């Protein structure tokens, strides 16, 4: 079974703090994704990576950056957390097969106070 | 226009009935289509994928794809209370991005 592990289930941070969300997958997948999920807005793509050190902006990259130094790990960084970044953050990974199936981690619920 | 649109519901069906969930998408070149189930407070779990026109059945679930109409649906037969969840339609477009609908909330009434 594919396992995608997010480092924290719940996180509370203060406005202006630098926040790191970590995601690790164990299936040697090339592609990894970061989404945020908000009521009424669904899942929105923040960034994705198709290889080590490679990244592409999604639909809502503002206020976020990412890092992928190793194939199994994809980090999302909030440079200066703001209250409007309070959300559920979901990491996903996908292999290169034609099936294009994404597997999700358990999610991190981030509250910025 | 949103990339993927779903009726947000809520949809309520009695136990044992058929639940029908619908989704439309805007990118005509899309090739991969998915249905995820998401329980409250949990992450999405893949239940069906479909890649070609027609029906695909897996147990009580049937996914239907009509590329000409840009329409994907999910039928759940013999609905159970444990099927109560939000169902997300996802589409991989001609690029490398996935787009998700906002989800349809399903309640199965015992």
Image (cartoon, coloured by chain):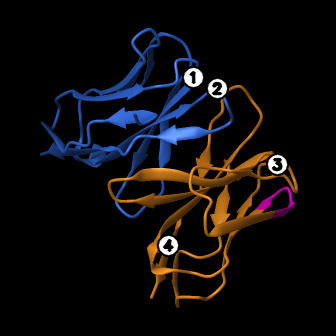
Dot 4 lies on which element?
helix
B61 and B40: which is toward the camera: B40
Cα gap from disc 4 to disc 2, whole angstroms = 29 Å
| Mark toward the viewer: 4 or 3 | 4
| Mark toward the viewer: 2 or 3 | 2
At x 58%, y 39%, the residue is: B98
Dot 3 lies on which element?
loop
Rendering coords of residue A72 (x, y %)? 81, 58
Dot 2 lies on which element?
loop
- Whether residue A106 can be seen here: no
Residue at numbered disc 4: A85
Residue at numbered disc 3: A28
Residue at numbered disc 2: B94
Q: Mark 4–mark 1 contact, CB under 8 Å?
A: no
| Chain assignment, label 3 | A
2 or 1: tag closer to the N-terminus: 1
A12 and B108: which is toward the camera: A12
In this picture, residue B108 sits left or right of residue B4: left
Segment colored magenta? A68-73
- Among the chains pictured, the one given blue colouring is B
4 or 3: tag closer to the N-terminus: 3
């Amino acid at each position: 079974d594919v396992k995608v592990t997010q480092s924290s289930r719940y996180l509370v941070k203060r406005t202006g703090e630098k926040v790191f969300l970590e995601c690790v997958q164990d299936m040697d997948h090339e592609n990894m994704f970061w989404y945020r999920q908000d009521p009424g807005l669904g899942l929105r793509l923040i960034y994705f990576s198709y290889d080590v050190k490679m990244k592409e902006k999604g639909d809502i990259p503002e206020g976020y950056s990412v890092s992928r130094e190793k194939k199994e790990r994809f980090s999302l960084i909030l440079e200066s957390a703001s209250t409007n970044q309070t959300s559920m953050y979901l990491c996903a990974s996908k292999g290169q097969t034609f099936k294009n199936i994404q597997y999700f981690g358990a999610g991190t619920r981030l509250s910025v106070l | 226009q949103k990339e993927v649109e779903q009726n947000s519901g809520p949809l309520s069906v009695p136990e044992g009935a058929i639940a029908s969930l619908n989704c439309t998408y805007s990118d005509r070149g899309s090739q991969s289509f998915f249905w995820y189930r998401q329980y409250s407070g949990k992450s999405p779990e893949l239940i069906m994928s479909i890649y070609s026109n027609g029906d695909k059945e897996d147990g009580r679930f049937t996914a239907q794809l009509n590329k000409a109409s840009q329409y994907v649906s999910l039928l759940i037969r013999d609905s159970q209370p444990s099927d109560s969840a939000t169902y997300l339609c996802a589409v991989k477009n001609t690029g490398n991005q996935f787009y998700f609908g906002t989800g349809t909330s399903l309640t199965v009434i015992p």
